[in-house]
Image (cartoon, rainbow, N blue to C red):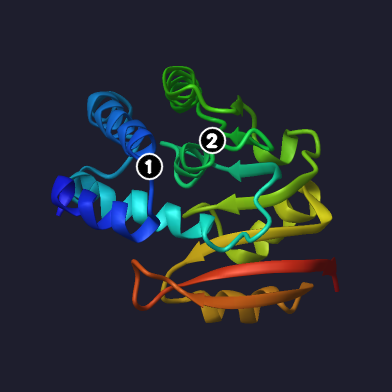
Amino acid sequence: MGKDYRREFQAEFNVSRETLARLDYYDTMLRKWNPAINLISKSTISALWQRHFHDSAQIYQLIPKKNGHWVDLGSGGGFPGLVLAILAVADPTIRFTLVESDQRKSAFLRTAIQELTLNATVITKRIEETEPLEADVLTARALASLDKLLEYTERHLKPEGTAIFPKGEKYKDEIDRAITLWQFDVEEIASKTNPNGAILKIGGITRV
């Protein structure tokens, strides 16, 4: 779909022309940097707007109270963190922290944040070595199994905060494994981009 999907994206998320222009610029940056540092799989470039932009943007719709500190773990090429920061660019009450241990990917993220004038910072450290970030909203995409994500969440999410994790077709198995180690409230939301997957909206996390 690629660029042809752009119009559907705009209609789905009702984004302004300014926001769409930022996403266009981000699209250009990804295509420019990707051959050198492999930000996303080469096979998904042609479906960038659906596979990555739409998949990330649907998370934004799941947070009714859009303010506070949003933290994205293992941001890679910026999904979902940079997309969320672009969607929130007009709202100064939301600030973003992107955690990415890879130096080259962090350099890309910082360049994108500067050129897109986003309210975001990058931490280049391993997640478990990063000081607790006190997130109101915590996200991670294609990073780790749910039980491992809950370890990170316990460290970096406020007790009253919300974690949102897009997951693939084996998400129910991941939930089953995680509940042997953790207590948590989970809402399973159908993914708009993966008919066999779900977005897990999680809170109330404590160790068993």
* Separation (CA) of disc 2 from disc 1: 10 Å
Residue 146 image offset from top left, x and y in percent: 61, 65
Left or right of 110 on screen, residue 1: left
Q: Which mark is residue 90?
A: 2
In which quarter of the view is residue 150 placed?
bottom right
Q: Amino acid at mark 1?
A: Ser
Residue pictured at 25% horizontal, 47% vertical? 48
Under tag 2, what secondary structure? loop
- Left or right side of 1 for 135: right
Where does the C terminus fall, quadrant-wise?
A: bottom right
Secondary structure of residue under mark 1: loop
Q: Are marks 2 and 1 in contact (CB under 8 Å)?
A: yes
Front residue of this view, candidates 130 and 70: 70
In the image, residue 124 sits, relative to residue 129, either above or below, namely above
Q: Which residue is mark 1?
A: 16
Establish if 114 lies above or below 51.
above
Q: Which class describes the residues within 10 Å of circle 2: few (<14), some (14-19), or many (20+)?
A: few
Give the residue at x 67% y 40%.
127
Position of the N terminus by quadrant = bottom left
